[in-house]
Image: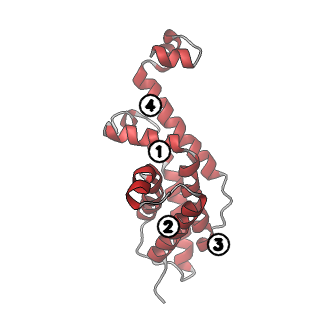
Amino acid sequence: MEKISKTAKSFDRMIYYYFGSKEGLFIEVLEDMYRRMNDAEMELRLDIEQPVESLTEIIRFVASYYHKNPEFITLLNTENLHRGKHISKSARARDYSSPAIDIIRQLLESGARKGVFRTDVSARNVYLLIAAMGYFYIANGYTLSTFLGEDLKTPEALAEWQTFIISAVMRTVMRNR
């Protein structure tokens, strides 16, 4: 706590006053990271009547966000090592995934009405697919680069992966013609 206080140019007692404990501070940091991602996501200008283009934009956003915010991935890794024990104490945790899932649901419904998306795909699963593919690549980029013998962090490699994610998600949601 002393190191946190020193870095923040504050005092231990101020951190305890505002956050109650070191765990309270960590929960606040986790919530803030999710809130910032949600805020950035809400800035996307999506057209529900253009479901393919809008879903593609969401995929690009997620892949780019993870790449540009590696501290988000680090915090998620840490919290998952602790089996989610801190975020489970958050009163706001569920609020952070709901907007994204709802937007994806609206896009899937619009695409189904237009006859381009399947009707049997859940927004939750599409959300998890996008998050998983984006997260795994960034979270494991250094070790995978070593194992594969190529730098997966180059702009070209990142762009290739983003294109692959888009293709995989679209193949999942598109109707067979």
Mark 1 highlights which residue?
A: 73
On residue 49, which mark appears? 3
Disc 4: CA contacts within 10 A as few (<14), some (14-19) or many (>=20): many
Q: Separation of disc 1 and disc 4 at Cα?
A: 15 Å
On residue 165, which mark appears? 2
On residue 39, which mark appears? none
> Element under label 3?
loop
Q: Earlier in the sequence, mark 4 or mark 3?
A: 4
Residues 7 and 86: in front is 7
Identified by mark 2, the residue type is Ile
> Element under label 1?
helix
Instruction: Give the label, 1 or 3, closer to the camera.
Output: 1
Disc 1: CA contacts within 10 A as few (<14), some (14-19) or many (>=20): some
Instruction: Give the label, 4 or 3, closer to the camera.
Output: 4
Q: Separation of disc 1 and disc 3 at Cα?
A: 32 Å
> Element under label 4?
helix
Q: Earlier in the sequence, mark 2 or mark 4?
A: 4
Identified by mark 3, the residue type is Glu
Mark 4 highlights which residue?
A: 27
Q: Separation of disc 2 and disc 1 at Cα?
A: 18 Å
Q: Separation of disc 2 and disc 4 at Cα?
A: 30 Å
